[in-house]
Amino acid sequence: MFLSIAAGLCESIDADRIYIGVNAVDYSGYPDCTPEFIQAFQHTLEVGTKAGKEGHPIRIVTPIGMDSKADIVRRGKKLGAPLHLTWSCYNGGEKACGHCDSCRLRLAGFKEAGYKDEIPYEDM
């Protein structure tokens, strides 16, 4: 859905790139995070948009697509990204649960990168 909306916006403002933060290495089973899905959607942009038919399709860029969670944490820290404002929990609530796949992957990534995750967790 997000890629479809972004593609429509790109066409309306004549933009040529969509950047999306999907990650295929340690995702939790979402097929739209896989390289195969991104390639298929890229093909859709090539054949199903005006820009694509005119020979300059909108390109999908996945800058962290094949990075580990630890790589992402290290890059975020190096760039000064406010990782304490990011959220990964699937369960919602005022605090992250600390138990769902996404929380466990996030916590393992911070640990492997050598950093403490600064967001509040329910049971930690």
Image (cartoon, rainbow, N blue to C red):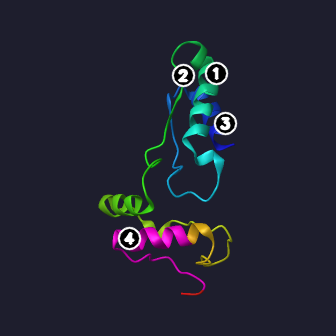
Q: Mark 2 — residue?
A: 57
Neighbor class of circle 3 (other Cα within 10 Å; few <14, some 14-19, many 20+) is few
Disc 4 to disc 3, C-alpha distance: 35 Å
First-in-chain label (4 vs 3)? 3
Q: Residue at x 53, y 80 (%)?
A: 120
26 in relation to 108, above or below: above
Kindly check if marks 1 and 2 are in contact, taking CB atoms under 8 A apart as contact: yes
Q: Amino acid at mark 3?
A: Ser
Disc 4 to disc 2, C-alpha distance: 38 Å
Q: Residue at x 58, y 78 (%)?
A: 98
Q: Amino acid at mark 2?
A: Pro
For label 4, the SS is helix
Q: What is the magenta range?
A: 104-122
63 in relation to 77, above or below: above
Could you tell me residue 123's position as x and y percent?
A: 59, 87
Residue 112 sits in quarter: bottom left
**Relative to residue 62, is residue 8 drawn left or right?**
right
Q: Residue at x 54, y 25 (%)?
A: 14
Neighbor class of circle 2 (other Cα within 10 Å; few <14, some 14-19, many 20+) is many
Kindly check if marks 4 and 2 are in contact, taking CB atoms under 8 A apart as contact: no
Q: Mark 3 — residue?
A: 4
Q: Amino acid at mark 1?
A: Thr
First-in-chain label (1 vs 3)? 3
Quarter of the rendering occupied by the N terminus: top right
**Residue 95, labelled with which disc?**
none
Q: Mark 1 — residue?
A: 49
89 in relation to 61, above or below: below
Disc 4 to disc 1, C-alpha distance: 42 Å
